[in-house]
Amino acid sequence: MALPLLALIPLATQPLTAQRADSADAARSLYRESRAAYGRGDTDAAFKGAVATAAAWPRQGSYVRYLARVAAATGHPDAALDALEIVTDMGFDWIPADSGWSALSAQPRFQALARRALEALAPITNSSVSVTLPPSFHHAEGVAFDPRTGRRFVSSIRLRKVVAVDATGNVSDFIGMAEPKLYAVFGMAADPVQRVLWLTTSAMKEQEGGTGADSGKSELRAYHLDSGIMLARWKLPATEPHCLGDVVLAPDGAAYASDSCQPHIYRATLEHGLTTIAATHRDWRNLQGIAFSPTGCTAW
């Protein structure tokens, strides 16, 4: 049932009407113009361009941080501090010791923001090493866990495979490049009840043996969680480029996969196959992770 996800679309996208895909393109264009102006010494145009860039895409912290840097360098300290405060509130990092902030460093407001930034950058040491993969295991991407067996599964972009790590830390190949060949392996989701490992695989130039001939090809697959036998595969249509990345399980057991190249989310079950497009919206750009509420009635 795709209705729970479809019902969310108006709630999730209405606040983003000012941040459409064309606004992202406008922000990139304004950013390039501002940098060019700064390079030729036109500081007034550079500052105005930085302001316009951040306004075009206000949720992109890197552009707000750029505004702060340009404002500091062109004699607009209040604008620089306002932008730094926004960046800090958003959780984007910036380095207080950077020489680009020297014109602000004596101001109490800057010093207070600097303390917050340094606190946010402090390492969190509550974690420990769970498992160490072999040095030859390049570009790990997805991780899935099977609570029934205690095994963890890790996918590789470069090696186009999935390894299993047992409860004692032993690493072994689970799914390899053998036919039907895998592309780079991205997200995975383990269903411990139905005993299914869902994964997305998409052709990438970084993958081993990648020639570019398969560029834009992408699939959603299902494997048996114990044997590694492939249960199903769905190829996305070759009429446009695709890159399935993240995949998650909804509370009803259906798999949902997001497409980083197209504004689409797909839904699949072993019983009913792949819903060509479970949800789509023109404001979506470079889709990544999905999270469901416990009831499955809402997704983010």
Image (spheres, helix red, strand yellow):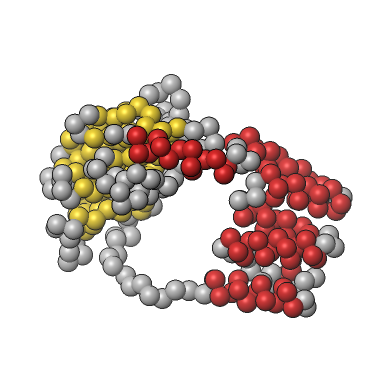
As drawn, the residue found furthest toward the top would be 239
**Residue 275: where, in percent of width, then height?**
32, 29
Q: How many marks?
A: 0
**Residue 172: where, in percent of width, then height?**
19, 54
The picture quadrant where one finds residue 129 is bottom left
Q: Residue visible at 24% across and 56% down? A: 145
Whether residue 133 is visible: yes
The picture quadrant where one finds residue 125 is bottom left
Q: Does 170 sit left or right of 289 as displayed?
A: left
Picture layout, residue 95 above or below residue 287:
below
Picture layout, residue 121 above or below residue 28:
below
Q: Quadrant of the N terminus?
A: top left
**Residue 142: where, in percent of width, then height?**
33, 51
Whether residue 161 is visible: no
Q: Does 12 sit left or right of 250 as displayed?
A: right
Q: Residue visible at 17% across and 35% down? A: 231
**Residue 255: where, in percent of width, then height?**
29, 40
Q: Residue visible at 26% across and 40% down? A: 254
Q: Residue visible at 20% across and 55% down? A: 146
In the image, 252 versus 176, the foreground residue is 252
